[in-house]
Image (cartoon, helix red, strand yellow):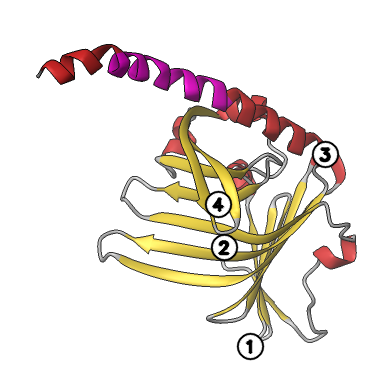
Amino acid sequence: MNSLLTQAPLLLLAFSMAPAVSAYELPSLLSSLDASASSFRTMTAKLKRIMHTAVINDDSVESGHVRVMRVRNNEIAMLIEFTEPGQKSVFFQGKKAEIYYPNIQTVHEFDLGKHKALVDQFLLLGFGNSSKELSRSYHIKWIGKEAVGAYQSARIELTPKSSQVAEHIKVAELWVQQPDGFPVRQKFVEKSGDYTLIEYSEVKWNPGLTPDQMTLKLPKNVKREFPQK
């Protein structure tokens, strides 16, 4: 007991210092996001996507490659080419999304319409987002530092401020490589407990992509379908 009492001042000092660590780390992280946002033009990486279904505790895993590019009017385009377990390509830009299934040579085209803002906030989270943009859309909470594959990263929790966004996502988490400020992992948790986890590896920031590399490679006889109609 005497030993504990003698250590009490040190313990109190340690606890009093803990909040100051996150208070220092979060502004540093947000500064790195601002730096990467201002310089961001293109990105390529390997990608793994895990979709977890809570009610049956089951994971569905896909992997492939992703390319991201800032295009006209500060818009972001993304091309994902999944290779495992099945082949398909997904392209997003503006209000249009396309999914190409090479095995049946068919493209499904979707009009994102009023949902475009949701796609931008979720799928493109961390790609060119400034700290001001994040703060406008989310309550930001510092979680800590964590290794993600080969990267040392800072992990933050993002709670949507918009009730419309909160209908779809309860909370998001973002792992940002330090000190360069690019995303290496994203997690989106739904109210049901289902979540999507996206992890990036072999990231190349601003590798010099061309617009031709950001298009679906479609055969001449491809069939185009519109599932929303």
Residue contact between numbered discs 3 and 2, judged by CB atoms under 8 Å: no
Q: CA distance from mark 2 to mark 1?
A: 22 Å
Residue 55, image x and y in percent? 25, 61
Residue for point 80% across, 76% down: 217
Label 1 sits on a secondary structure element that is: loop
Q: Secondary structure at mark 2?
A: loop
Sequence-wise, the earlier of marks 2 and 1 is 1
Task: Left or right? Give the position of 160 relative to 74.
Answer: left
Badge 4 is on which residue? 185
Against 66, residue 223 (above or below) is below
Residue at 68%, 45% in the rendered image: 182
> Could you say where residue 148 lies in the image, as x and y percent from the top left?
53, 54
Lower sequence index among marks 3 and 2? 3
Residue bearing mark 2: 228
Amino acid at pointer 4: Arg
* Of the image marks 2 and 4, the number of the one nearer the N terminus: 4
